[in-house]
Amino acid sequence: MPVGEAVQNRYGTLHGGCTATLVDTVSTAALLTASPHSGVSVGLSVNYLAPMPGGPNEAVLIDAKVVKVGRQLATLAVELRRKATGQVVATGSHTKFLQVADPAIQKMRSKL
């Protein structure tokens, strides 16, 4: 992803809030490759390891992987790297609750 002005903070680097949003959205996309449920966030953590410079020739590479999908929880991991050097600039972890409908509860609700 290019690190243009729209995603930079006042210091000209990738904004921390943008980084957290990337962890959230890209990990959810990864989850959808392993589960039909996108889930809801129960935990999101970001470690900011180095500034990611912005500019016309700067880009961040984002890699997400599914660590585990259980019956009700999914654990995901994300790594952001500076394209030019390969330096890791941030890592993130995301835990999502997978609301799987219980057929017995659905049947009971339909009678109401």
Image (tube, rainbow, N blue to C red):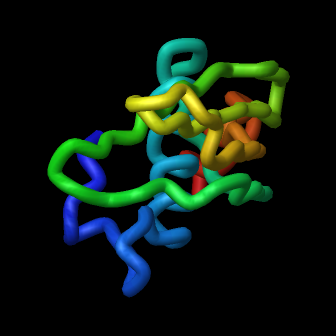
Find residue 20 and report its image quarter: bottom right
**66 vs 49: above or below:** above
Q: Foreground: 110 or 79?
A: 79
Quarter of the image containing the N terminus?
top left
**Residue found at the very far front of the displayed protein:** 85
The answer to whether 97 appears left or right of 22 in the picture is right
Task: List x then y, in percent, for residue 84.
Answer: 40, 31
Please name whichever residue, 93 or 11, is drawn nearer the observer in this view of the structure.
11
Please provide percent x and percent y for residue 74. Answer: 76, 32
> Could you say where residue 18 lies in the image, as x and y percent from the top left?
44, 64
Relative to residue 35, is residue 45 drawn left or right?
right
- Asked if residue 107 shows in the view, the reply is no
* Viewer-closest of 86 and 20: 86
- Residue depicted at 29% across the width and 45% down the height: 58
Q: Could you say which quadrant of the image residue 68 lies in?
A: top right
* Left or right: 55 in relation to 62: left
Inspect this view and state whether residue 60 appears. yes
Q: Residue at x 83, y 22 (%)?
A: 70
